[in-house]
Amino acid sequence: MTTTWWRRVAALLVVVAVVLAACGGDGGDDEATDGTGRGWVDGEPDWESAADGAYAVAAEDSAGGGDAASVESLAGDDIARPGDLGPLRAGSVDDNADLDGFVAYLDRIAGLGIQVRPHDPRGRILVEVTGANGLPVAGAEVVVRAGGSEVGRLRTTADGTVRVHPVNLGLGPDATVEVATDGSEPTTSAAGSTVALTVDRDGGAEGPVPLDVVFLLDATGSMGDEIDRLRTTIDSVSERIAALESRPDVRFGMTLYRDEGDAFVTSTFDLTSDLAAFRAALAEVQAGGGGDYPEALDEGLADALSAHSWRDPAEAVQLVFLVADAPPQVGRDVPVPYDASIRDATGRGIKIFPVASSESDDQAEAVFRQLAQATGARFVFLSYGAGGAATGGSTDIASTDYEELALDELVVRLVSEELDALTGAATPVPTTTPPTTAPPQGQ
């Protein structure tokens, strides 16, 4: 019942968005830039096209038909909807904290016939790189060898860790590898182990930490029910991160994606230190298109990693927040599938935090959790109190597994934790909306 309601409302919202766009224009040529001429890479996209209207028809058909009167009658149903619940709220889980449970979840999803691209976390080896002062070393390149040959290079994230997945390096899940980084002794590491490497220079950071944050947004019509509120949330997040006591040297950017046949497939607003320019560009974002449920997440993620002017990964903390409600087109042959982007991200020390929105199903959840686990991030999902969470029907995440917070506060906390790892001190994050649940034991 809930899914049907949302599909019908999404169809109605897309029709309204098309009408408003026709009346209000597309923002013209007033591109916001940071002085480098980048701004919208290749120019601001056309937000609407005739093809985008097909989403409304497709959504209406998939909902079993119905007119405005029937949609209005559904509005009185006693069901949980994001619009009823005030500020967006969310929970999160860390699949690296229970890797065996995550592997069991993936096996169960595969047994249900749900397709995902290959990423096998079995045999994961956790490598921790620490400096002479006891603080983590971010951006350190870890070389992985097996049988005397190099099989991979990974970079540590802000907490000084990398995750070596033997299967994804062409080895078996029980493989033994040798890991080393600049200034450390090579160490033999068995599958499933945790390895500590120490270098002869200090870890951590002094002064403002360089921080690049990219928001990767699903801008298809099915996101129309939440795009305005997500825009407000991201606006709040960017402002609050820039104002953290640690005063990071922060830049924000965004990549949008829809799907083939829409007004655009991907569009990127480059990383900028000009917060006002980023917020102005964010204000222009509109949802439209889509047609079917899966979207061009593969292409969007590839552009998020390649189209931005990221700083040197050895010197900057780099994060991607993916906000979406649908899986990628896993049956489609694309130049850079998301499993290749996982290898790219882990090679550069980029964490990917997926934020699942209200229409997410089992396939979307599985893909999002793959991205988070592989890069050392947490899986974030919108939550609706008694109405449940934006997870699939076969999820293993229970309401007792997470603390529910305002989404903007949760994202700021996640960013703050990355910075705190480098300074060894906790940065206070003011609570804007009290949590509705207590944190689970051990979290």
Image (tube, helix red, strand yellow):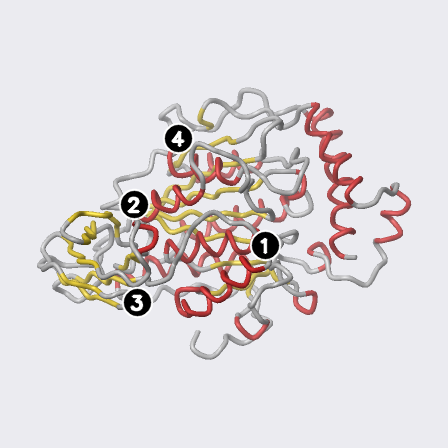
The quadrant where residue 37 appears: top left
Which residue is located at x 23 percent, y 66 percent? 190
Q: CA distance from mark 2 to mark 1?
A: 32 Å
Which residue position holds label 4? 34
Cα gap from disc 4 to disc 1, whole angstroms: 47 Å
**Mark 3 is on which residue type?**
Gly
The residue beneath circle 2 is 348
Q: Nearer the viewer, residue 425 or 170?
A: 170
Tell which of 148 and 403 is nearer to you. 148
Give the x, y percent position of residue 49.
Answer: 67, 24
Tell me which numbered mark, 2 or 3, is placed earlier along the sequence.
3
Q: Nearer the viewer, mark 2 or mark 3?
A: 3
Q: Is residue 379 above or below residue 232?
A: below
Q: Nearer the viewer, mark 3 or mark 1?
A: 1
Q: Which residue is mark 1?
A: 113
Type of amino acid at the residue the image marks with label 1: Gly
Per the image, the residue denoted by label 3 is 192
The mark that comes first in sequence, 4 or 1, is 4
Q: Residue furthest top?
A: 29
- Left or right of 321: which side holds 74? right
Q: CA distance from mark 2 to mark 3?
A: 22 Å
Callout 2 amino acid? Arg
Marks 4 and 3, how far apart at CA: 45 Å
| Residue 51 percent across, percent down from the top left | 69, 25
